[in-house]
Image: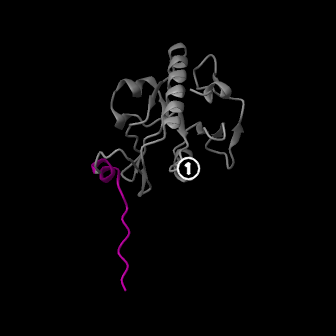
Amino acid sequence: MRMAAPIYYTADLARALPDDGNRYEVVHGELLVTPAPRPWHEELVARLLEALRGYLRREPVGHAFGSRSDISWGPYVRVEPDVFVVPLAQARSLDWSRMRELLLVVEVLSPSSNRADRFTKRRLYQEQGVPVYWIVDGDAELVEVWTPEREDPAVERERVSWRPTGATNPFTINLRDLFRPI
């Protein structure tokens, strides 16, 4: 019996998939499909985006975006980070294809994204030299902090900080505030 050839997805194939509420991403040809997130996921994304945008108004070293993006580093890669920061010049282009230098990436875990966020996308962000990658676990109320050279994360349970190049002060968020009930 002959096995069917595996399908290697491209960013363009993922872009052509239906707008059905799922998130379609591709990492090294592997299609990652994530259903609509839980409300808690969306609340954490909104809180992080709001806090980062406030910080970046005071420290104008970049611009923060949330979800529904189209970040690609080649034909077999397309991701939509939950929250990310790019340099101002790239953000001002208003063109996803010019936003390739991610200064910070944040993924908020969902049951359906756990493997992809912790392994597949983490490795991609490390390979691309993203200086800081946070994995926010809203259920465990902690943040894993990854950098390109780390083989294990730093696990933060009280606060998490980020100091981008060119900033006078760091961005710090108290995790008790981040994970407070609605």
Range shown magenta: 1-16
Nearer to the camera, 74 or 44: 44
Residue at (51% x, 49% y) in the render: 113
Quarter occupied by residue 134: top right
Side of 23 where 48 appears, left or right = right
In the image, residue 9 lies in the stretch drawn in magenta: yes
Q: Which element is circle 1 on? A: helix
In which quadrant of the rendered view does residue 9 lie? bottom left
Q: Main secondary structure of the magenta part?
A: loop
> Along the horizontal axis of the image, is 112 left or right of 36?
right
Residue under pointer 1: 114
- Crowding around mark 1 (Cα neighbors within 10 Å: few <14, some 14 to 19, many 20+) is some
Q: Position of residue 111 (x, y in %)?
A: 54, 49
Q: Percent position (x, y) of residue 11?
A: 35, 50
Write down the quadrant of residue 70 in the picture: top left
Q: Position of residue 151 (x, y in %)?
A: 67, 50
Check the image and name the residue furthest to the front. 182
Q: Is the residue 63 above or below the residue 58 in the image? A: below
Q: Residue at x 37, y 34 (%)?
A: 98
- Along the line of sight, the residue nearer the viewer: 106 or 91: 106
Q: Which quadrant would the C terminus be assigned to in this image?
A: top right
Amino acid identity at mark 1: Asn
Q: Residue lying farthest top?
A: 58
Instruction: Please determine whether, in this image, residue 147 is positioned above or below residue 6.
Output: above
Residue at x-position 64% and y-position 24%:
177
* The residue positioned farthest toward the bottom in the image shown: 1
